[in-house]
Structures are given as C-alpha cells and as structure tokens.
Image (spheres, helix red, strand yellow):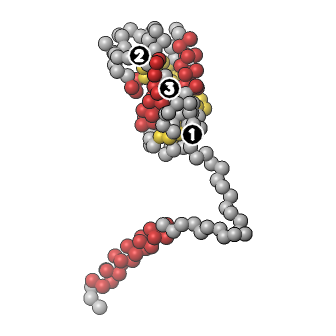
Amino acid sequence: MTDTQPRRFWLLAPLSAGFAAIVSACKTAPVPGPGQPQAPQASAVKGPIVGSKGSVQSSSATSARAYRQDGATHLYDLNAKRIYKGKMPPLLYAIGVLNVEIDKAGRVIRLDWMRAPRHAPEVVAEIERTVKQASPFPAPTRMGKVVYTDTWLWHKSGQFQLDTLTEGQL
C-alpha cells in the first residue's frame, strides 16, 4: 500500500457523504395511497393578503434597510396622485421619521414615531392613516417580520415624498 491510498480514501469519504446527502435531499415525499391518512396541512401563512392594487406580494429583502425600498415603492404605488413630483422646495411643512412594524403576512402591526412633526398633528394622523390603509405591505418572506424606518417629507399642499425615493430638494 502506498502513501497516497489512505489519503485518497479520506478525501473521497467526505465527498461521497456530501453527494449522498444531496441525493437524499432530492427525494420527494411519498404520496399516500388510497385509504391511507394524509398528513395535516400546515396552517402557517403562505403570503400576504392580496391588496387592492398591484403591489408586490412578497419581498425578498434580507434586512430592514433593503425592505425599506419595497415598503416605499408599495406606498408610492397606492398613493401615486399624492406624491410630490420633482424636487421638493427648501422649506417643507413637516418632516417625520416613522418606524413601521410589518408581520410575516405583510400586515402593519405597530407604528412608532422616532420624530413626529408635533407642530402638525394633522400630518401625523394622515401619515398613520396612509400607512395603515396601505396594509398589507409586501410580506418579508426572508425575515419573518420587519421593522423599517422611513422619513416622510411633507409639502404644505398635502403631497409627500419618502426619503427612500425622494427626488431631492431645490
């Protein structure tokens, strides 16, 4: 027996085990025959509740920062007429920073102001109403649930931009 034969065996053993694991993972579950009980269906939520408009039903984001883009796009899709077009003026009526907690089905379960525009309580109420009405958001399928933060830039006309998708200021 030469020196290389034992080494080859130790090299082939893990490779063979890995190949066997891959092949066994590819097997399909057996289909129950007639008269056999079927496995109970999982009651877990499969995806979001379908929204009123054509927003994305799920998000593949892996972080709150990445999900923020999906959340902002969803809000823009549902509020297209309320989005301020172009660069915002230098002085805005209100600016607010809001945390939005989304569950695994895309439903809004909590709103938490980091910086509320206290001088404009009507804006606070309108932003909260807008976010709640936009539920369900894209389901954060890779995270289970998510808390994301966005900054609302509010013009005196009642139109807004989100910092995530803003066109900037003059």
Residue shown at 56%/11% (left/top)? 122
What mark, if any, has residue 48 been given in the picture? 1
Quarter placement of the C terminus? top left
- Packing grade of label 3 (10 A; few <14, some 14-19, many >=20) is some
Asked if residue 137 lies left or right of residue 91, the reply is right
| Disc 3: which residue | 78
Res 84 label: 2
**In this image, 39 relative to 84: left or right?**
right
Task: Look at 66% across and 55% down and name the residue there.
Answer: 41
Q: Label 3 is placed on what type of residue?
A: Leu
Please tell me how crowded label 1 is: few (under 14), some (14-19), or many (20+) other residues with Cα within 10 Å: many
Looking at the image, the residue that sits furthest to the front is 34
Q: Quadrant of the N terminus?
A: bottom left
Instruction: Tell me the SS state at disc 1.
Output: loop
The answer for how far apart the CA atoms under marks 3 and 2 are is 14 Å
User: What's under tag 1, amino acid-wise?
Assistant: Pro
Horizontal and vertical percent position of residue 115: 50, 19
